[in-house]
Image (cartoon, helix red, strand yellow):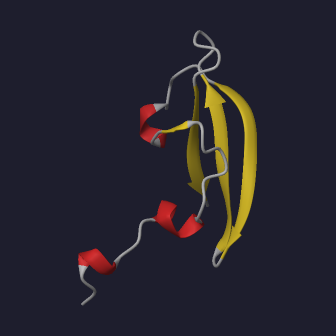
Amino acid sequence: MVKKTELQTFGNTVGARSFPNAAEVKIKDIIGEPIIVKDAAFKEMQYGEVAILLFEYPDNEGAEFSVLVGG
């Protein structure tokens, strides 16, 4: 059995963040919220491509945040 301390999160395996100045949020925290997609970065991983998406809320211009997604 693998020890929990030996496991890496999905986010840790991607490497450096594509938008280092943006706050990082979980997808569950923005579902159903009005958001503006500003940019996307794609990285090829061992089992496929992931996207790091850059967003902002329409009423808070300049307060950017990012989400890591994969399929």
- Whether 15 is drawn above or below 26: the answer is below
Q: In which quarter of the image is the N terminus?
A: bottom left
Residue at 74%, 31% (x, y): give it: 38
- Residue 64 falls in which quadrant of the image? top right
Most extreme residue toward the front, as rendered? Answer: 21
- Whether 64 is drawn above or below 48: the answer is above
The one nearer the camera, 34 or 64, is 64
- Whether 46 is drawn above or below 51: the answer is below
Residue at 27%, 75% (x, y): give it: 5
Number of numbered discs overlaid on the protein picture: 0
Q: Quadrant of the C terminus?
A: bottom right
Residue at 74%, 44% (x, y): give it: 40
Going by the image, does 12 lie left or right of 49?
left
Residue at 60%, 53% (x, y): give it: 17
Residue 65 percent coordinates (x, y): 56, 33
Residue 46 percent coordinates (x, y): 64, 79
Residue 55 percent coordinates (x, y): 64, 31
- Whether 36 is drawn above or below 17: the answer is above
Most extreme residue toward the bottom, as rendered? Answer: 1
The one nearer the camera, 52 or 22, is 22
- Residue 20 falls in which quadrant of the image? top right
Going by the image, does 33 lie left or right of 62?
left
Residue 62 percent coordinates (x, y): 64, 19
